[in-house]
Amino acid sequence: MKKKSTDPEVWETKYLRIAKMIEKPKTSVYGVFSRSSLELLGSIYWEFGWRQYVFEVVKPRDGQEKIIWSRGCLKEVIDFVQMIMDARKKSKLA
């Protein structure tokens, strides 16, 4: 995944904008937004019980039955989670 933004708090992909929303002492919470509509689609956060970052989809808006994800969008979320997990592992080794 290429970090296209000059702001280190924001990552942009072909379909998504992922922005750091909350910084905690050891972990962060990221918002996942549609690049086309800027609508919040979900969040990525550290799940302590699972000891890893997870992605949680937001509930559909009123009137929507579901939110559909393509392989491309899912891959971008997976690539981002892998990137922050790798960075976390490296920081623990340093």
Image: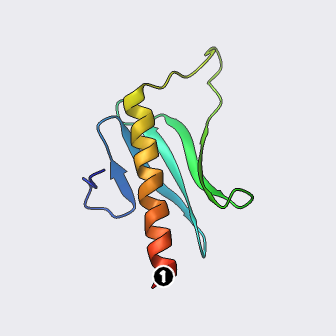
SS assignment at label 1: helix
Q: Position of residue 6 (x, y in %)?
A: 25, 61
Q: Residue at x 57, y 46 (%)?
A: 43
Q: What's under tag 1, amino acid-wise?
A: Leu
Q: Residue at x 63, y 14 (%)?
A: 63
Q: Quadrant of residue 26?
A: bottom right
Q: Position of residue 88 (x, y in %)?
A: 50, 70
Relative placement, left or right, of 9 versus 69 is: left
35 and 92: which is toward the camera: 92
10 and 27: which is toward the camera: 27
Q: Is residue 19 above or below residue 68?
A: below
Relative placement, left or right, of 25 versus 39 is: right
39 and 83: which is toward the camera: 83
Q: Is residue 61 above or below residue 9?
A: above
Q: Which residue is mark 1?
A: 93
Q: Is residue 86 above or below residue 37?
A: below
75 and 60: which is toward the camera: 75
